[in-house]
Image: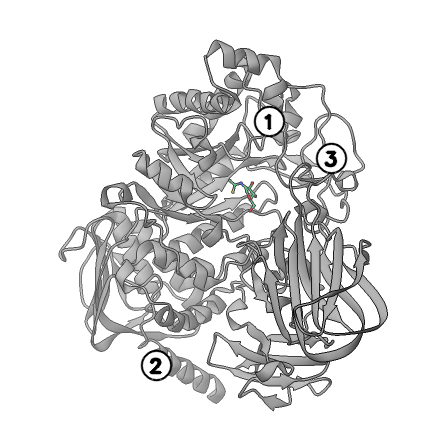
Amino acid sequence: MRITLFLLCSLFLSGTVIGQKISIIPKPASITTATGTFKLTAATKLVVPNDADLNAARFLNDYLQQYLGFQLPVTKQRGANSIVLSTRQHIAAPGNDGYAFTSGPTGITVDGETGAGTFYGVQTLIQLLPANAAPGMQSVAIPAVRISDAPRFQYRGMHLDVTRHMFPLSFIKKYIDYLALHKMNYFHWHLTDDQGWRIEIKKYPQLTSVGGWRDGTIIGRYPGTGNDNQRYGGFYTQEEVKEVVKYAADRFITVVPEIEMPGHASAAIAAFPWLSCFPEKETEIPHHPSAASKAKGGKKVQETFGVFEDIFCAGKDSTFLFLQDVVDEVVPLFPSKYFHVGGDEAPKEHWAQCPKCQARIKAEGLKDEHGLQSYLIQRMEKYLNAKGKTIIGWDEILEGGLAPNAIVMSWRGEAGGIAAAKDKHQVIMTPGSHVYFDHSQSGDEDSVTIGGFTPIEKVYSYEPVPKELNEAQAKFVLGAQANLWTEYIRYPQKVEYMVFPRIGALSEVLWSPKAGRSWPEFEQRLQTQFTRYNTWGVNWSKAYFDIAATVQPAQGNKGLQVKLASKDKTGKLTYGISGVHFAKNYTAPIVVNQTSAITALYSRNGQVMDSVSVNLMFNKATGKKVTINPPPAPNYPGDGAFTLVNGIINNKGMTRSAEFIGYNGKPVTIVIDLGSVQPLEMVAAHALSAGGSWVHPPQEMEVSLSTDGTSYKRMGTAREFKGVTPQKGMLEVVAEGQRGRFVKLVLKPLEKIPANLPGAGNAAWMFLDEIEVR
Ligand code: TNX
């Protein structure tokens, strides 16, 4: 009993103490702190004069029940010890779904400009509760503050792809709750794609009974190492869709459905081959026969990822009738004024060969196949406009002429958005560079992702209004959205891992005034947010705690020095060299002169947050002066020329973008200064090989030596790429009895990718990671 009492007391105390700290994400437009606190207990009344605010009250009560173990009685009667939720009542609240919030010893009032504003005020209140809220806390202290707040952008979105992988309805609702907790207001639901059709259409049951299922999925990252041969699929019934839409609406979130056209249509075509230009043609699994499941033949729901040529036939009227029927059933399910028609990544090869599509191009006086895509989108736009809907399309809908009223979602960078805004079209920014949450957020990601590197600070740095737009044009930017494509995201836990904590950064980009944004200050609030994630039971990414190891040449090019750092400063960094693990506290860069393994560990509150090992392989070139000409391609700069002599042999391939430099079709000349004339017998260049991504080994390496850096003597030429692993290998020149100080290498890439390989006809990429001199 005494223990219980003690526990209760300490919980109460910790609640009181932590309750003082104000840490709200997204940061409110203005906060003024006052003295004192409001004591929230189960006896506090929740005063809700208007029934319209009952949803906000319910959200608060659900939260309190789940995380504190009690609810508040709801009443219309004002009185002492109460929280008053009201829309347009007694405090002047800022416009655009803003709210005013006041807390003090006698009570709390939340006044929204709109119902949504009141709901956002409730989210703020939730973040004034102790972050480590736990059932059993009988009383929590809410600091006295005055907040006046309103969103910067009217469109604050998150997308979820349920086609590549699908998630239970319960998780879709959880995802919507996560949006609500971040004051986001649009959920873009990607419902159809090559790998599955996920929404019931009553007129066409085969869309889900056939198109909702695939016979297998590639194993690992594209192109994969084979096929798992597991039947995979499912779909949401119209009743379930309605449930989601209502659930979201109760949280002031609009669900925007996406039905992809004319590309990403394999699942629909598998159900109804006549939707294709070539119904008899078997579905191809391009370039990767080993990736196809054992079940073969006919039209298939895709089992691998990427872009596929079999798209909706724009020559047949039956295609349009089908799409209209689908629209007829989807529109009534979604009150949203927006309807997303996809429009991205539609290869035009089939249309170019299809007599019906060619006849349509002629009959309609269209310029080419891009004109035909524009025709299809415009025809569907007319149909949707007549039903009161505004279409959204990916930025490809700009090609061949933009539909008159369309909103553009700019994903291939910002160019599409800029062009559309200049053309007086509304724009939603979703550039792959900053808000693709399927990209890795750790430079040392150990799960399979699509690649890329978009750490939280990059998301935080995003500015949705491009500099290229003037004030009038900027008004066309409705906001931004993060996209979560799920090729490599199979379970809800992985969704959470990819979303958290980046959603916090995005919410602030979209909600908070631009002038008040500061990364270092956000980092402090992030710490509290991490505690909240633990309270919510979220599987959040610990990438923020990653140990960054930077390798540089040591002074005078004598060896290497290794710097270790974590962005987090609340924990402890220890390390060891070659066998002695984590014994030393890290205080200054570590200098090494020989092949070594450095292991480092970052811990916080006794919990390991990250560990890394840096394997440095020394040869005569390691840490020495090196020059390259020309510089690498801007998108694959690695760590500059030093990448080639930094002691790191990149065995992890393309996920380690700092550990290789890339050249496209052009040869490179590399010169290494060893510092003194030495006997030499071997020079090798390590390179990556990933044909699926157009990366091919160097075709030739010519090595020459010099003692003075001016006159060079040929040492030898290598043309054979010796594979070390399937993705990795080297070209090597061996010649005994040589001497030199300067080593010059000329490496030539494959100039043109041969037919039948991905990227056929284009220049190949050459990715170099290390030069070895012995
Ligand atoms: C491109 S973004 C796609 C998706 C993929 C995504 C992977 C867009 C409009 N299309 O089909 O899933 O890349 O990052």
Q: Give the CA distance from mark 3 to mark 1.
A: 23 Å
**Residue 192 picture quarter:** top right
Mark 3 Cα shell of 10 Å, populated few (<14), some (14-19), many (≥20): few
Q: Nearer the viewer, mark 3 or mark 1?
A: 3
- Against 17, is 62 above or below? above
The residue that disc 3 covers is 755
The residue that disc 1 covers is 311
Q: Which mark is residue 184?
A: none
Q: Earlier in the sequence, mark 3 or mark 2?
A: 2
* Quarter of the image with the C terminus in it: bottom right
Location of residue 682 in the rendering, given as x and y in whole percent from the top left corner: 81, 69
Three-letter residue code for mark 3 = Ala
Location of residue 84 in the rendering, given as x and y in whole percent from the top left corner: 22, 60
Q: Give the CA distance from mark 3 to mark 2.
A: 68 Å
The residue that disc 2 covers is 17
Location of residue 282 in the rendering, given as x and y in whole percent from the top left corner: 73, 25
- Against 440, is 594 above or below? below
Mark 1 Cα shell of 10 Å, populated few (<14), some (14-19), many (≥20): many
Location of residue 95 in the rendering, given as x and y in whole percent from the top left corner: 19, 50
Colour option used: one colour
Q: Earlier in the sequence, mark 2 or mark 1?
A: 2
What residue do we see at 52% from left, 49% from top? 484
In this rendering, would 615 be left or right of 131? right
In terms of secondary structure, where does tag 2 sit? helix
Three-letter residue code for mark 2 = Val
**Residue 727 picture quarter:** bottom right
Question: 124 or 597: nearer the eye?
Answer: 597
In terms of secondary structure, where does tag 1 sit? loop
